[in-house]
Amino acid sequence: MKLIIHRGTAEIGGTCVEVFTEKSRIVIDFGLPLVNAQNEPFDSRALVGKSPDELRKLKILPNVSGLYKDQDRSIDAILISHSHMDHYGLLRYVHPGIPIYMSEGAKTLIEVSDIFTPHKIGKVNANVIDKRKKLVIGDFEIVPYLVDHSAFDALAFMIKADGKRIFYSGDFRGHGRKSGLYKRMVSKPPKSIDCLLLEGSMIGRGEQLFKDEDAVQDRIEKALKTTPNIKLLFASSQNIDRIVSAYKACLKTNHVFVIDIYTAYILDCLRKVSKHIPQFNWKNIRVKFLKSHADSIAQNASVKFLYAYNSRKIEIDEINAIKDKVLMLARDNSIFPILVKNIKGIEGAKIIYSMWEGYLTDKFKEFIAQKKLSMDVIHTSGHATVADLKAFASAINPKALVPIHTFHADRYGEMFKNVRALSDGEMWEVGS
């Protein structure tokens, strides 16, 4: 069994790994880059109007033969670990005959994203993985592992072939609402792993402000109790752990959690995966209609959802009347000024920023200063801390540990044993 990391040995995002034997070939993740060749934020508009061949020449698409629509198919399958764009965002270019395997939650979130976001992947040959069963593809036996991550229903994979075993960590952590999955993995790890492909997003980032999701919930509760004005939550609607934390904080402080249609639709669609995810018609939840979201559902999904959400719709007059007891999901910097334009007495309101601080722009900071809003950063990462990475690697004890999904592969040798650093495009025979 051999592997090539086509992208990911020296960057976070754009992950793409090829694993192959003499008879079978699979790809693990096929993500949109987060940075370009100059290490600047990648602009997805660079994809517009270009053929797969042009994008391969620009090195935006990895050079994987038999993967693309304009080629004869020779890839047996693609495994997608989770629903973050940097792990699936290039699927629109894949040959339609290639089956793509992912969890039910990932499939649902990818389909919802295609309705609401400008970067679309379109219809793909998506297949749901049964997390309780192994999957056989050609020479490969694949065992999925549910992991704790900020992306809902994320997976790691153990891949067996030719008497060797690869463990692909995907993105994971040990401090979210599914931290028990991490603890179970460390206490009862998979055995005899020849190669561990280990993500390292948190290497080089320093310590977290909040140690876990429980600490985030506690701090949100405090902000709700101590702010006599509306509270505005900046968090990803697809970070279900964070939505749950915010909702529980609202229940404990008797606040109304105002979500938008996009978020209501996500939660609605995920009901089939988990009955424990808050829903638009649960206690203390109301729905704020934004025209762009309503139009997206009306054009691309069932209008019945809009009618259902009408029963929990909240207008700006009611928000103003109860604003001291409102936590409103804001999410996007660009639409925030429109969202708060008609809120009376906004001065002194609290922004709860519950996302990576790298998304904060100077323009947004200037706006909140102008409006005299205060801001608390209340966030914990979707990725494993260095301490948890070390415990994870020690428990699995691989014969070789390969850095991936990191800007700091050069530091792995200080932290882990049996490190085998690769370069993008380098072929390596597992166990050699």
Image: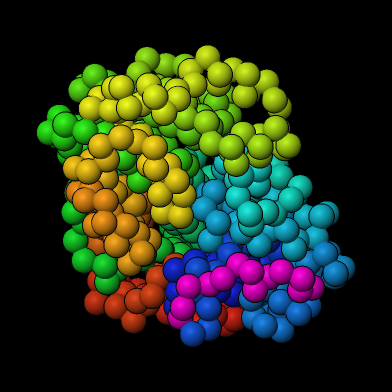
Colouring chosen for the image of the structure: rainbow
Q: Residue furthest left?
A: 226
In terms of image quadrants, where is residue 367? bottom left
How would you classify the magenta stretch by its main secondary structure? loop
In the rendered image, the quadrant that contains the N terminus is bottom right
Q: Which residue is drawn at 25% across and 62% down?
A: 386
* Image-based side of 235 in relation to 20, left or right: left
Which of these two is toward me, 189 or 389? 389
Which of these two is toward me, 113 or 376? 376
Q: Residue at x 85, y 69 (%)?
A: 70
Answer above or below: position of 174 versus 342.
below
Answer whether residue 45 is magenta in the image.
yes
Answer above or below: position of 410 versus 14.
below
* Image-based side of 41 in relation to 118, left or right: left
How far from the left and from the top, in percent, is residue 38? Answer: 49, 85
Which of these two is toward me, 284 or 86? 284
Q: Residue at x 29, y 22 (%)?
A: 322
Answer above or below: position of 383 versus 241.
below
Answer above or below: position of 217 versus 118.
above
Can residue 138 be seen in the rendering of this structure? no
Answer whether residue 133 is magenta in the image.
no
Can residue 272 be seen in the rendering of this structure? yes
In terms of image quadrants, where is residue 362? bottom left
In terms of image quadrants, where is residue 255? top left
How far from the left and from the top, in percent, is residue 269? Answer: 58, 29
Q: Residue at x 65, y 47 (%)?
A: 114
- What is the magenta range? 39-51
